[in-house]
Amino acid sequence: MIMNNLFSNTKVLEKALDASILRNEVIANNIANVDTPDFKRKAVKFEEMLRNVVNTSGGENGNVDSIEPEVYTDLANLSYRSDGNNVDIDTEMADMAKNTMKYNVLISQMNSRFRDLKTVMKSSY
Amino acid sequence: MSFFSSMDVSSSGLTAQRLRMDLISQNIANADTTRTEEGTPYRRKTLTFEEKKRSFSDVFNSKMRSIVGNAQDDSNEDSGESIGAGVKVGKIVEDQSPFKKVYDPGNPEADSDGYVSMPNVDIVQEMVNMISASRTYEANVTSMNTSKSMAMKALEIGRG
């Protein structure tokens, strides 16, 4: 019981980290395919799903486990260039920078949770 | 999906752009080559890019994982489409546009009217493509470094 509660607070962070890693891979794939004709950029849907779960079940005790980050094709009908590709390299680089910052924030959040646990576990003399 | 697959994706981009760069160098080096093994002037070479799909084992593993995951916490349907595995070079093709005719009667390759067929390489076009390839290469390097820094950061969990 107590162990469940002890580590349950990192669940959302874990899911968010997974989504962040997946998003990094998707962006890397978009950048690699910046010159591929008819390639359409892909994106990851996660925050929206997390918000829904938190809103319906309330707080971090919600059914966070059931969230699976979803990869989808973005703006499939938009051809940004004459070769049918819709990857904008500047947007991708900006997204990648954003994603890395978010990832770093999540890691430091995770660290601070563990630091809290360590503090509690220390004996008091 | 693993931590290093995003680095594989970036490296496929690096490989493809480097090959493109090799072809551009070849085109520039042969901009004045009037005779090749086939006996014709040099033809400009170019390549096509294709999206690389995931291998069978990758798709199989992720499907299995999602099925097992669903059985445990009866979550919703399998999540969307899969990500590609980067980019690959489809094929290397020769530009079939006509050769340039240059009037140079003193040239040993000149025909009876004094015209020489020169390769269909446009130096300016090659230079522009070279800049484009180099920038895309840099973008892939940045993406690779970002993936690396994320992987290193993950090792810090629980340390601080």
Image (cartoon, coloured by chain):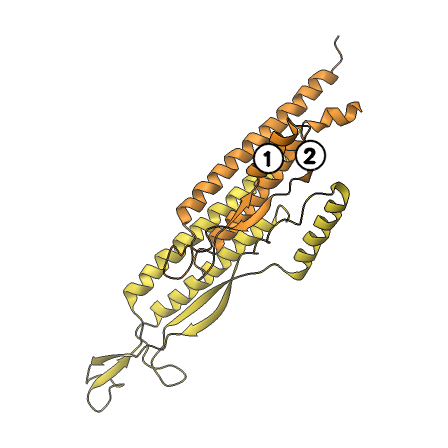
Chain colours: A orange, B yellow
**Any part of residue B153 in sight:** yes
| Residue B68 tag number | none
Q: Is residue A104 above or below residue A34?
A: above
Q: Quadrant of residue B34?
A: bottom left
Q: Chain of mark 2?
A: A
Q: Quadrant of the C terminus of chain A?
A: top right
Does the CB distance between marks 2 and 1 fall below 8 Å? no
Q: Residue at x 20, y 84 (%)?
A: B106
Q: Gap in Å between the C-alphas at discs 2 and 1? A: 10 Å
In-front residue for pair B127/A68: A68
Q: Quadrant of residue A80?
A: bottom left
- Residue bearing the label numbered 2: A63
Q: Position of residue B153 (x, y in %)?
A: 59, 35
Question: What amino acid is found at the position of numbered circle 2 in the picture?
Answer: Asn
- Residue bearing the label numbered 1: A52
Q: Position of residue B69 (x, y in %)?
A: 73, 45
